[in-house]
Image (spheres, rainbow, N blue to C red):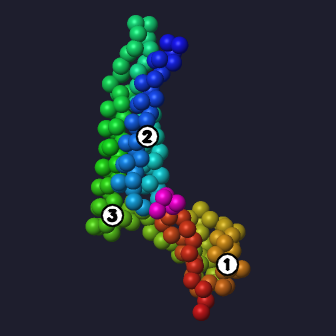
Amino acid sequence: MQELMDALPAAGCTATVFLFILVGLRTIGRRQSAQLTAMDLLIVLLLGSAVETSMIGIKRGSEGPMHDPNTSLVAGLVAAGTLFIIDFLFARASERWPGVARLLGGKAMLLCRDGAPIQENLRRAGMTDDDLLHALRTLGYDSPTEVRFAVLEPNGDVDAVPVS
């Protein structure tokens, strides 16, 4: 029974962290959530790590509950808030300076031109001819000869323009 009583503060901390991150993601992260950029994925991974210990921050020692300031609820919220601010600042810098956007988000890469795969770009993208064919079939094309060009977008999608 004492263990259950000791764990109750963790439930309150977890609920607080959940609400804080939910509000933060809704406020700061207005991008399409179905397609995460590398920056979005990094923020999500770091958020999980930043708040992990703050949800259970009180430890039991032989002398009773011990508080570690690095695992407190406030420390977790400050860490998460810092990540939200960094994401916000990078998003604004990307809007203002195209070079920052290219650095953080990448740029589109031409995979196929006039029906011919560009082998060097496929290699740089970590793709094979079969990967390209699969992506084109997903878009409704049977072969590269049906597209004027195909592009790997920074979000990982492949887009194609048909031969007119």
In the rendered structure, the answer to whether residue 94 lies left or right of residue 150 reads left
Q: Position of residue 54 (x, y in %)?
A: 40, 30
Q: Residue at x 52, y 60 (%)?
A: 34
Q: Residues within 10 Å of mark 1 (few under 14, many from 20)?
A: few
Q: Secondary structure at mark 1?
A: loop
Does 62 sit above or below residue 42?
A: above
Provide the residue designation for mark 1.
140
Q: Residue at x 66, y 85 (%)?
A: 146
Provide the residue designation for mark 2.
18
Number of numbered markers: 3
Is residue 33 rendered magenta in the image? yes
Q: Nearer the viewer, residue 121 or 65?
A: 65
Labels 1 and 2: the sequence-earlier one: 2
Mark 3 vs mark 1, foreground winner is 1
What amino acid is labelled 3 in the image?
A: Ser
Segment colored magenta: 32-36
Q: Position of residue 121 (x, y in %)?
A: 56, 70
Q: Nearer the viewer, residue 100 or 42?
A: 42
Q: Secondary structure at mark 2?
A: helix
Q: Quadrant of residue 126?
A: bottom right
Labels 2 and 3: the sequence-earlier one: 2
Q: Position of residue 30 (x, y in %)?
A: 39, 60
Q: Residues within 10 Å of mark 2 (few under 14, many from 20)?
A: some
Alpha carbon distance from label 1 to label 2 = 41 Å
Q: Residue at x 50, y 64 (%)?
A: 155
